[in-house]
Image (tube, rainbow, N blue to C red):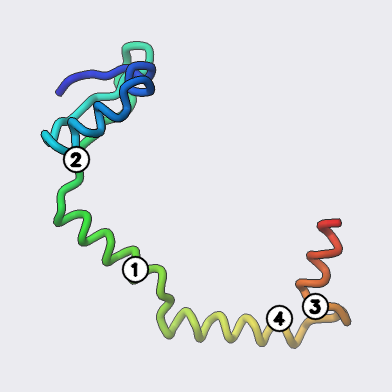
Amino acid sequence: MPNVGVRELKNQTTKVIRDVRENRAEYVITYRGRPVAVLLPVAEEWLEAETGRAVAAAKPGDDVRAELEELRGEIGRSWKSDKTGVELVSEQRR
C-alpha cells in the first residue's frame, strides 16, 4: 500500500482518486511522515447496504412520528407567549 503525503494528495487528488476508482488502489495518507488515514475503494455491496440504511434513516418511522406529535402537544400546552416560535426566533436574529 503506497504512502501519499497530505501535500502530495492535495496536488494530485484527481490522479489518486482515479487510481483508487479504476485500479482499486489503496493509499496510506501521511502527515509529516506519520500515517493518519487510509484511502480505500468502496465495495459495491457495502455501498448498496449503506445507501439502504441511509434512506431508511431519512424516513422516520411511525414511532418517531408519534413521539414528535406527543412533544408538539406538550409544547403547545405549555406555550405562554402570544407569538409563535418562528416569530420569536425571527426577532432574535435582528
**Residue 75 — which label?**
4
Mark positioned earlier in the residue sequence (3 or 2): 2
Could you tell me residue 7's position as x and y percent?
38, 17
Task: Classify mark 1: helix, strand or loop.
Answer: helix
The one nearer the camera, 49 or 63, is 49
Among the two numbered marks 4 and 2 on one chain, the one whose residue lies closer to the N terminus: 2
Q: Say which residue label 2 marks.
A: 41
* Residue 89 position by quadrant: bottom right
Residue holding disc 1 = 55
Amino acid carrying mark 3 in the image: Thr
Secondary structure of the residue carrying tag 2 is: loop
**Tag 2: amino acid:** Pro
Q: Earlier in the sequence, mark 1 or mark 3?
A: 1
> Could you tell me if the residues under marks 4 and 3 are in contact, i.e. CB atoms within 8 Å?
no
Seen in the picture, residue 10 relative to 46 is either above or below; the reply is above
Of the 4 image quadrants, the one containing the C terminus is: bottom right
Q: Nearer the viewer, mark 4 or mark 1?
A: 1
Tag 3: Cα neighbours inside 10 Å, few (<14), some, or many (≥20)? few
